[in-house]
Amino acid sequence: MESALSLTYAWLKAGHVIFVIFWIAGMFMLPRYYVYHQESAPGSDEEKRWIDRETKLRKIIITPAMILVWVLGLSLAWTTGAWQEGWFHAKFAIVVALSGYHGWLVGYGRKLAAGQRPLSGKSLRIMNEIPGLATVLIVILVIVKPF
């Protein structure tokens, strides 16, 4: 029984890490796409191509990856009993915030597709750093387990 649990843990962890990479890579790309989209002429063919790219990135890569990160991550937490650990609570809070940011990006993409451009390119470039900062904090929490 212990070896089956060990094998399950290894596969859950591998899947979790793989889909975290997909999700975060997409979260790095999407704000950059939005910058280029905003710099294109409204109503142009280029803008239409950016809308198509953004939609595909969100629907084919980022959102499915986020869902799998959550499913596999919660399965890992349950399997390992991580709910009792302080570092896990902090990691969980960051992942919740990152998921909220993901939702905000989806909403912002819909605004762009509707012709609205509420943020500057500079603001989007700064926001592009959010997934990187979240990733640094999460990796430190998971590897170092400072509390």
Image: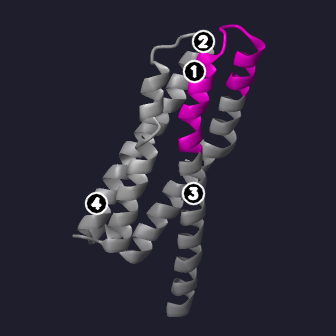
For marks 1 and 4, the one nearer the N-term is 4
> Mark 4 Cα within 10 Å, few/some/many (few <14, many 20+)?
some
Does the magenta-highlighted stretch encompass residue 44? yes
Q: Residue at x 65, y 15 (%)?
A: 40
Does the magenta-highlighted stretch encompass residue 12? no
Name the residue carrying label 2. Answer: 114
* Residue sitting at the far right: 45
Left or right: 123 as drawn, with respect to 89: right
Q: Residue at x 38, y 49 (%)?
A: 133
The location of residue 43, given as percent across then percent down, is: 70, 7
Name the residue carrying label 3. Answer: 21
Q: Is residue 26 above or below residue 12?
A: above
Q: Is residue 28 above or below residue 13?
A: above
For the residue labelled by badge 4, is the local secondary structure a helix, a strand or a loop? Answer: helix
Check if mark 3's residue and mark 2's residue have beta carbons within 8 Å: no
Residue 17 figure quarter: bottom right
Check if mark 2's residue and mark 1's residue have beta carbons within 8 Å: yes
Residue 97 figure quarter: top left
Name the residue carrying label 4. Answer: 89
Mark pair 4, 3: CA separation? 21 Å
Amino acid on which disc 1 is placed: Arg
Amino acid on which disc 2 is placed: Ala
The location of residue 1, given as percent across then percent down, is: 52, 92
Q: Residue at x 57, y 26 (%)?
A: 34
Disc 4 versus disc 3: nearer the observer? 3
Mark pair 2, 1: CA separation? 6 Å
Q: Give the residues drawn in magenta, as a range.
A: 26-52
Q: Residue at x 43, y 37 (%)?
A: 101
Amino acid on which disc 3 is placed: Ile
